[in-house]
Image (cartoon, grey):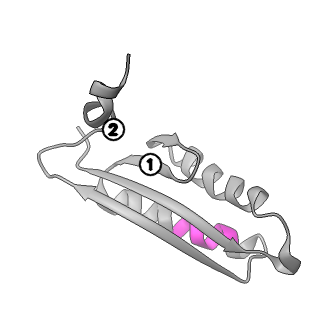
């Protein structure tokens, strides 16, 4: 079982005030390529894994957006860490039908 849940919302500054969605899509692609369990929600994406791996993905997301032409990126990150194990499914099971 994973030890960490990490939720991230990226807020890219776009060149010329462009729509941010294509840039957010690029950030999500980084998560998808990583292979970690994740869930995309309306305002943030939650990943499940080991803390060091998830923080590396965050770094890669930042770099991908800069490489895509964003002059800067703000990321809001929430981390739930439990060395004994934590999962999205376990935390949300009571809310599923």
Residue 95 image point, x, y percent: 34, 27
Residue farthest top in this picture: 97
Q: Nearer the viewer, residue 68 or 73?
A: 73
The answer to which image quadrant residue 51 occupies is: bottom left
Residue found at x 30% / y 53%: 50
Answer with left or right where residue 24 lies relative to residue 8. Answer: right
- Residue 41 placed where, x, y %? 54, 44
Task: Decide which of 19, 95 is in the foreground and name it.
Answer: 95
Mark 2 in CB contact with mark 1 (< 8 angstroms)? yes
Residue 46: image tag: 1
Neighbourhood count class around disc 2 (C-alpha, 10 Å): few under 14, some 14–19, many 20 upward: some
Q: Is residue 60 left or right of residue 78?
A: right
Q: For this view, does 88 lie left or right of residue 15?
A: left
Magenta residue span: 59-65
The vertical placement of 96 against 49, above or below, is above
* CA gap, disc 2 and disc 1: 8 Å
Q: Earlier in the sequence, mark 2 or mark 1?
A: 1
* Tag 2 residue: 88
Instruction: Look at the image and say whether residue 61 sits in the magenta stretch.
Output: yes
Circle 1: element type? strand
Image spot of residue 18 (x, y percent): 85, 69
At 47% across and 41% down in the image, what residue appears? 38
Residue 22 higher or lower than 47, as above or below: below
Nearer the observer, 70 or 11:
11
Quadrant of the drawing holding the C terminus: top left
């Amino acid at each position: 079982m994973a030890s960490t849940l990490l939720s991230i919302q990226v807020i890219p500054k776009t060149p010329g005030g462009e729509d941010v969605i294509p840039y957010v899509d690029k950030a999500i692609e980084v998560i998808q390529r990583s292979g970690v369990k994740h869930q995309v929600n309306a305002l943030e994406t939650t990943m499940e894994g080991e803390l060091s791996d998830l923080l590396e993905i965050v770094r890669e997301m930042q770099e991908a957006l800069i490489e895509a032409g964003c002059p800067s990126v703000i990321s809001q990150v929430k981390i739930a860490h439990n060395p004994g194990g934590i999962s999205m499914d376990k935390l949300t099971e009571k809310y599923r039908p």
